[in-house]
Image (cartoon, grey):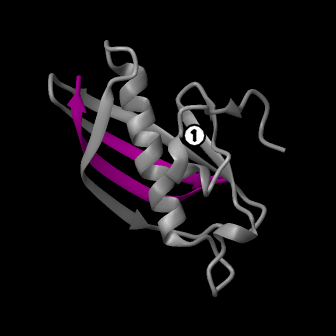
Amino acid sequence: MPPEGFEPITDEGAFVQHIGPLLGRDGVVGLRIDERHINSFGKAQGGVLATLVDFANAHNVRIESEEEYPSVATVSLTVDYLGTASEGDWVEAHVTVERLGGTLAFVDCSVRAGDKEIVRGRAVFAVLT
């Protein structure tokens, strides 16, 4: 079960549905790590966590934009792996939209498993209206 208040995100798109369901609450995007997400070392695959970062960042840019659900495209994404998540862990992506201009958005993301930060991501998005 997810923490209280998390609801399914319905605009995740076909690709992200492969790792989901993704759940959201107040801009935080969460995912329960299950056997599909585990690599040969028994930890969450880095690509799953990078996808979570990318999606959570874009999701928050859309939330904060004045346009209703503008299209956004990833220009650059940097992901630093600081720790690991195991099967059964609940991970949350906490996002800060640092700057949202007319055509670009600059975003920072911290993915946490419990009280530890396991991924740090920064991104630039093109905002397409």
Residue at horizontal 33%, vertical 24%?
70
Quadrant placement of the C terminus? top left
* Magenta stretch holds residue 113: yes
Query: In this image, 7 relative to 119: left or right?
Result: right
Over which residues does the magenta segment extend?
107-129
* Magenta stretch holds residue 24: no
Q: Residue furthest bottom?
A: 40
Overall secondary structure of the magenta section: strand
Residue at horizontal 59%, vertical 70%?
84
Query: In this image, 118 relative to 127: left or right?
Result: right
Residue at horizontal 62%, vertical 80%?
39
Give the camera-side residue of 91 and 65: 65
Q: Is residue 79 visible?
A: yes
Give the camera-side residue of 26 and 23: 23
Indicate the quadrant where residue 9 lies: top right
Residue at horizontal 45%, vertical 51%?
53
Quadrant placement of the N terminus? top right
Q: Is residue 86 visible?
A: no
- Residue type of the residue flagged with mark 1: Val
Q: Which residue is mark 1?
A: 29
Helix, strand or loop at disc 1? Answer: strand
Query: In this image, 108 relative to 81: left or right?
Result: left
- From the viewer's perspective, is residue 40 above or below residue 54? below
**Residue 34, position as x, y percentages in the image:** 74, 64
